[in-house]
Image (tube, helix red, strand yellow):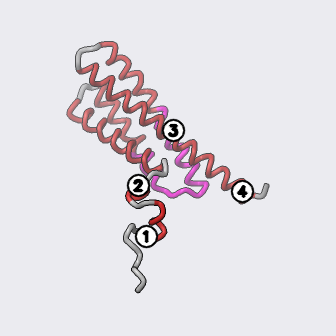
């Protein structure tokens, strides 16, 4: 196997790992939202679980940023790394504001973390709205920006 194929396989494996870790992060953040709702209802066990799962979210954020860095070095675009680093950095005030019960910061930041992770997971999964907006047989007629190609007379 030559170096080009090896590099391509490495990039593909890193992309797959990044997709899986992003999906895992999404599942963890959804769990966090559910546990937070139960905790706000007065369930002390849910609050303890919410705090424990926060540590898992931080560990996954580190793994996600690390994979994004390695994937970037293998030739991926830089935006997954930038978003992963922002998510990792945002975990710190998220955990601190939760511990200090600063819910005015903790709740909106949690929603922002979840929303950003949903957007990242959708994008890296390869799904784009244009894939369902344009029938497959008509896709060849569309340019990259989604507008119909000029009609020939």
Residue 62, x across and y down, in percent: 49, 38
Determine crowd level at label 1: few under 14, some 14-19, many 20+ residues with C-alpha closer than 10 A: few
Disc 4/disc 1 C-alpha distance (Å): 31 Å
Q: Which is nearer the eye, 149 or 71?
A: 149
Disc 2/disc 3 C-alpha distance (Å): 26 Å
Provide the residue designation for mark 2: 132
Residue 42, x across and y down, in percent: 24, 15
Instruction: Give the structural element (helix, strand or loop) at label 1.
Output: loop
The magenta stretch is: 59-86
In the image, residue 32 lies in the stretch drawn in magenta: no
Q: Residue at x 47, y 60 (%)?
A: 136
Provide the residue designation for mark 3: 21
Provide the residue designation for mark 4: 5
Residue 57, x across and y down, in percent: 43, 31
Name, please, the residue furthest toward the bottom.
153
Q: Residue at x 25, y 33 (%)?
A: 107
Which corner quadrant of the image does residue 148 belong to? bottom left
Which corner quadrant of the image does residue 1 belong to? bottom right
Residues at marks 2 and 3 touching, judged by CB atoms closer than 8 Å: no
Viewer-side label of 4, 1:
1
Determine crowd level at label 2: few under 14, some 14-19, many 20+ residues with C-alpha closer than 10 A: few
């Amino acid at each position: 196997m030559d170096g080009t194929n090896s590099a391509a396989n490495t990039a593909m494996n890193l992309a797959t790992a990044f997709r899986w870790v992003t999906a895992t992060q999404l599942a963890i953040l959804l769990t966090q939202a559910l546990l937070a709702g139960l905790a706000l209802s007065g369930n002390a066990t849910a609050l303890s679980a919410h705090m424990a799962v926060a540590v898992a979210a931080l560990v996954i954020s580190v793994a996600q940023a690390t994979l994004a860095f390695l994937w970037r070095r293998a030739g991926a675009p830089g935006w997954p790394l930038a978003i992963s680093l922002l998510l990792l950095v945002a975990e710190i005030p998220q955990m601190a504001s939760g511990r200090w019960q600063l819910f005015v910061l903790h709740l909106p930041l949690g929603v922002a973390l979840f929303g950003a992770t949903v957007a990242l997971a959708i994008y890296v999964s390869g799904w784009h709205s244009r894939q369902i907006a344009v029938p497959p047989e008509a896709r060849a007629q569309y340019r990259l920006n989604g507008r119909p190609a000029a009609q020939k007379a």
